Image (cartoon, helix red, strand yellow):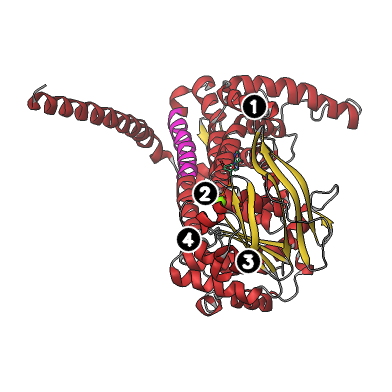
Amino acid sequence: MSRRWINRITFLFMGLTGLACATVILLVALILGHIAYHGVHHLSWEFLTTAPRAGMTEGGIFPAIFGTVFLVLLMTIAVVPLGVCTAVYLQEYAPAGSKLVHAVRLAIQNLAGVPAIVFGLFGLGFFIEFAGRSVDRLFYGGQLHFGQPAILWAALTMALLTLPTVVVATEEALRVVPRGHREAAYALGATRWQMVRYVLLPQATGGILTGTILAVSRGAGEVAPILFTGAAYYLPELPRRLNHQFMELGYHVYVMATQSPDVDATKPILYATVFVLLTLTFLLNFSAVVLRARIRRRLAEGR
Amino acid sequence: MGISYDASVPSPADKLVVERLRVRKGKNAILNGVSLTVRGGEILALIGPAGSGKTTFLRCLNRLIDLEPELAVEGRLRLDGLDVYGEGVDVPSLRRRIGMVFAVPNPLPMSIRDNLTLGLRILGAAAAGPPSERIERSLKAAYLWDEVKDRLDDSALKLSGGQQQRLCLARSLMAGPELLLLDEPCSGLDPISTAKIEEALQGLKSRISVVLVTNNVKQASRCSDRTAFLLMGDLVEMGETGLIFTNPQNRRTADYVSGRFG
Ligand SMILES: Nc1ncnc2c1ncn2[C@@H]1O[C@H](COP(=O)(O)OP(=O)(O)OP(=O)(O)O)[C@@H](O)[C@H]1O
Ligand SMILES: [Mg+2]
């Protein structure tokens, strides 16, 4: 091929790849811009701190923000210990090449591919119908306390959904700890747990935090898993107990978009709610990125 | 076919007695029945070409080889009469009696002080005593004190390679080990750091037995009391360092120490 042709092809590919990038950026900007344009002017302190009124055509979204935060908090409490322990077991305790490890890894990979709505159905069947009912039968003489949709069950369902994120991030963080660091601790007389505790976990903190924040931002955005397990259309009161139902931002958006009695009146509220939800998840993702960079730097400096 | 140095009658001066140590991976033998003793307060140099099993031998002594379950270890090791591979041996407390320095310096990504006190923290604070005295003593013994005494809370990773290796030496001395294992501790270091480590070993040896693996024959002749020559998993010859270098009994030893192969 002549030089001129090669140059032309190079130019063509550069153009195409550049175009692809531009499209992505444009799309993101379009979505954000559209939402910001329609939503920002409706934002106010009142909007963020009051409850909806008049069939959701007026008022704010405070209960939904509160419910979202409560939900992801519970979810984090459930998913981080479980995920970290799973990852530590897989990386450090399980014998190399064992069938069990293979099975658990496969299960986690598959878990990551399961559609969110299936988690919702699973939560309904397992947590509410089975676990909740059992709790009621054992402790409340069959009275209905936990055998119904509740923030606890929604959080546990969400924890299952985000488990792979935490496990994979932690495993990755453990894997990059050099063998020499492990051996240094063992040679000093550390037991396996002490090695994990004094050498691995401090170095994996960054990875664990990153995984946690990604899990939280995912959990804050998903609606399907909480659809049947605890989210409510409208509640006059905030949830105060683990077996209360709750309002949630994503679900609130869904409700307003599909079941509003007055579509035109809800529209600005809808946009503003979406804007809040997106800001929240973006902030979380962004802080994950910053955190990871900072902890990498700190580790490299060994402080 | 390794020559066996009579190890069946341990004398009180023997710190460690190794009898017919064999290490296999499947059918491949890595060590073919090595028998030797390490005396109290001596520096024993272990020399041999790459792949002869020096590191493997060393890792058997503190059972770090347990981390590689694919390797089968046979034979008997006694540390002051304790059967190292006996049933019910508490491996962590065995390892606390034995210090180890690796070929590649492996300070942990924390401060110099935290590196040094790691072993004490593992033991639990109660058993630690005042750590600052121990820190000073260990760093002085490793010839590092003057260089780091004002910056104990700096990152250990900011030290030079030679300083890092001496920090690892100091770290292994914190618990007051009886036996010190060094795997080519100077392989990547400059002559000055090497000299400092060699000096440190001389200072230590009256109290501690040292097994020094080295790929540097001159280092073995400079600083060891006895030398063992390992070749393809066999102990070819072992004796007073002076004799091994001036009057080796085996032709392969003679060839190796004079630099004709390896
Ligand atoms: N975990 C293992 N699995 C398989 N083979 C191994 C393992 N560990 C060591 N070996 C083999 O055993 C032999 C001896 O290795 P070892 O590391 O003890 O040699 P060395 O004398 O320390 O060599 P060097 O001077 O290069 O450090 C080598 O052939 C090596 O490939
Ligand atoms: Mg080696």
Q: Secondary structure at mark 2?
A: loop
User: Which one is nearer the viewer's eye here, B109 or B69?
Assistant: B69
In the image, residue B15 above or below residue A174: below
User: Which one is nearer the viewer's eye here, A155 or A58?
Assistant: A155
* CA distance separating discs 2 and 4: 34 Å
Q: Secondary structure at mark 3?
A: helix
* Image side of residue A230 versus residue A287, left or right: right
Residue wearing tag 2: B50
Q: Which residues, given as a range, are shown in magenta?
A: A267-286
Residue wearing tag 4: A301
Find out whether the residues at labels 3 and 2 contact each other: C-beta distance under 8 Å.
Answer: no
- Same chain, marks 3 and 4? no
Q: Residue at x 49, y 69 (%)?
A: B194
Confirm or reject: label 1 Cβ below 8 Å from ligand 1: no
Residue wearing tag 1: A102
- Observer-side mark, 3 or 1, equals 3
- Observer-side mark, 3 or 4, equals 3
